Image: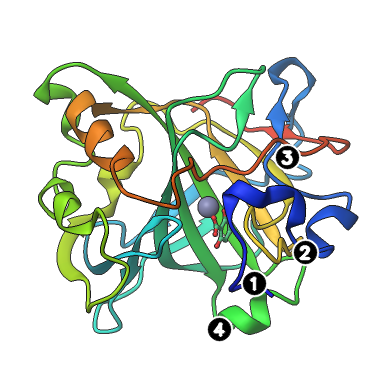
Amino acid sequence: SSSEWSYKYETQWPKQCRNGGLQSPINIMSRSAIVDTFQTHIRGPLVFRGYGDVNLRTANTGRTLKWTLEEDTGAPVLSGGPLRGNYTFVQFHLHWFSEHAIDGMKYPMEIHMLHVKTGLTIEEALKRPDGLAVIAVFCQVHAGENSGYSLQQIEAVLPELYNSTSGPGFTSTLNLSRLLSPQQQSYYTYNGSLTTPDCQEVVTWIVMDHPISISDSQYKMIRQVNVGGVDNYRRLQPTNRVVYKSAAS
Ligand code: GRE
Ligand code: ZN
């Protein structure tokens, strides 16, 4: 089932994508988010370990561009915040336009950094409510090359990927911390789902509040990637749950 779906026919996504009450993405209402002063849900700061240079393999999956960690590299590990235990970085991929919205506003692009509960395979993680943690980073587009710092290291491979969904892909070294905003690490967090079939409700979402900048030429290149003649975001799902906001840091 999960191999045969497209963004163009979202209404025909499998049944498990419509049933649950914890689907993603959602519109986050900033004034309804609970700032967890007593640290009952968010128990401390988010901790990023090993978010430096890593070797990644790039692919055009036909639905997104994806950068997957090469096995020979020490894996970055995420912990803290709303998470219990460690989560190992697996891949990041792109959605254009953004999937989440803040106060009804969407961004041109959203990066998803996928982490699996350390010690579990992805298949195992997909069966546990706490199996995955995804960091979502919004991107805003600015004119000029100076705004392209975050994605500078992936720019060169983009034209090679426009139509190629086969082949070995490209490996490259990339500093993952460039995908996080240097200024601010405050975020919203809630329990939700994968935004692609089969939409399993196993994701602790950590949606960074502060967007990073990409250049207009980078954005143009990314939007030339053919993912079926449509954009690759899922429509907003009912919120009907608590969203927490980290204290500003
Ligand atoms: C996706 O395919 O876009 C995806 C995953 C896992 C978690 C979140 C998500 O594969 O958006
Ligand atoms: Zn995604």
Secondary structure beneath label 1: loop
Please tell me which of labels 3 and 2 falls first in the chain: 2
Is residue 87 visible in the rendered image? The answer is: yes
Whether residues under marks 1 and 2 lie with C-beta atoms below 8 angstroms apart, the answer is yes
Q: Amino acid at mark 1?
A: Ser
Instruction: List the residue tagged with mark 2.
Output: 14
Q: Can you say which quadrant of the picture contains the N terminus?
A: bottom right
Q: Mark 3 vs mark 2: give the one in front.
A: 2
Task: Where is residue 135? Give x, y as percent.
Answer: 51, 48
189 or 223, nearer to the observer: 223
Q: Which mark is residue 119?
A: 4
Please tell me which of labels 4 and 1 falls first in the chain: 1
Instruction: List the residue tagged with mark 1.
Output: 2
Q: CA distance from mark 4 to mark 1?
A: 24 Å
Q: Mark 4 vs mark 1: give the one in front.
A: 1
Task: Where is residue 133? Give x, y as percent.
Answer: 59, 58
Q: Amino acid at mark 3?
A: Gln
210 or 79, nearer to the observer: 210
Please tell me which of labels 1 and 2 falls first in the chain: 1
Q: Mark 3 vs mark 4: give the one in front.
A: 4
Mark 1, ligand 1, within 8 Å: the answer is: no
Q: CA distance from mark 1 to mark 3?
A: 37 Å
Number of labelled discs? 4
Q: CA distance from mark 4 to mark 2?
A: 29 Å
At label 3, counting other C-alpha atoms closer than 10 Å, the crowd grade (few under 14, some 14-19, many 20 or more) is few
Instruction: List the residue tagged with mark 3.
Output: 39
